[in-house]
Image (cartoon, rainbow, N blue to C red):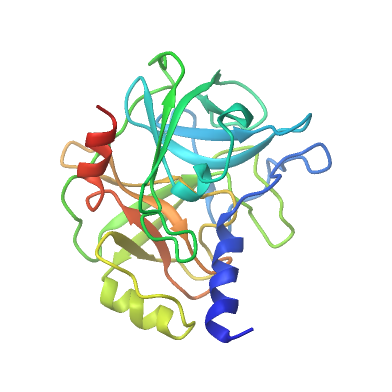
Amino acid sequence: MNLRKMFFQLGIVFLLSQGLFAESEKPDGDTRILGGKNAPEGFAKYQVSIRKKPGKDEWHHCGGSILNEEWVLTAAHCTYGNKMSELSIMVGTNKLLSGGTRYKIKKMITHEKYAKKDLRNDIALIQIDGKIAMTGNVKAIKLKKEAVSVGTKCTLTGWGFVDNYRRVPNDLQYLEFTTISNKECNNKLKKSSFAPIDEKQLCVKRPERKGACNGDSGGPLVVADDNKEFVQIGVVSWGIPCGRNYPDVFASVSGYHDWIEKNMK
């Protein structure tokens, strides 16, 4: 196996969450997502947990964000090859094991040019069966149409693995990053023989020995706007597991804004 292929497969392993809390592996509420912190009550009301239940066991499959009463934004690799009947959406809770409201899925739209081999166009929409009730703990997030500047502070939330022992937090975790240029991102990833980042992808610098991990896929990367409200700028796509000295890569919301708006009509 050549070096390029080996590292790319490591990136896929980072992303594809499988069995994150089946009966044999319960979440540990005292753990942290590679240096993250427990999100306080009412934080990230737009966050969803996409659950998968192909049999009797169910697990957290991917993250996502609420765009309005009908639509959730996530990564294409979270919907590609999955059956709607095996997936559901949980909203309104920062706990994996308690609270929240579950919704069935009516429709999944995976980007028509999604490329599984290199995770290009890694973005998807999920339409809810019915309407999401916008209660005190549930709120849609706005999308940022314009690209953000290099050096922007941003925040990621998710229920991904918290360590190399594959432990999963019961509490939603959050971690802050800083955006970097695609040129810098490509320079850093070139050492690992990854495919170059394109204009529809966004990279962030991880804090040392911290970062996203398996199970954070599809989750929202956000920044605060002038009104101190969160707006979404990215969707977790891929990275080199986990917390190593490489950038994390996201599908850029600004790069896919028109596609998102078109497909929600």
**Residue nearer the viewer, 24 or 55:** 55
> Looking at the picture, does residue 132 appear above or below residue 156?
above
Left or right placement of residue 71 versus residue 88 in this view:
left
Residue placed most toward the observer, 29 or 5: 5
Whether residue 258 is situated above or below residue 239 in the rendered picture = above
Question: Quarter holding the N terminus?
Answer: bottom right
Residue 102 in view here: yes
Does residue 38 appear left or right of residue 53 in this picture?
Answer: left
Q: Residue at x 44, y 61 (%)?
A: 119
Q: Residue at x 71, y 44 (%)?
A: 19
Q: Is residue 185 left or right of residue 242?
A: left
Name of the residue lying farthest toward the front: 112
Q: Position of residue 135 (x, y in %)?
A: 41, 14
Q: Position of residue 174 (x, y in %)?
A: 48, 47
Asked if residue 229 shows in the view, the reply is no
Q: Quadrant of residue 20?
A: top right
Identify whether 261 is placed above or below 254. above
Farthest residue, direction right: 24
Task: State the image quarter where residue 13 is shown.
Answer: bottom right
Residue under the point 22% across and 35% down: 262
Residue 15: x %, y % from top left: 55, 56
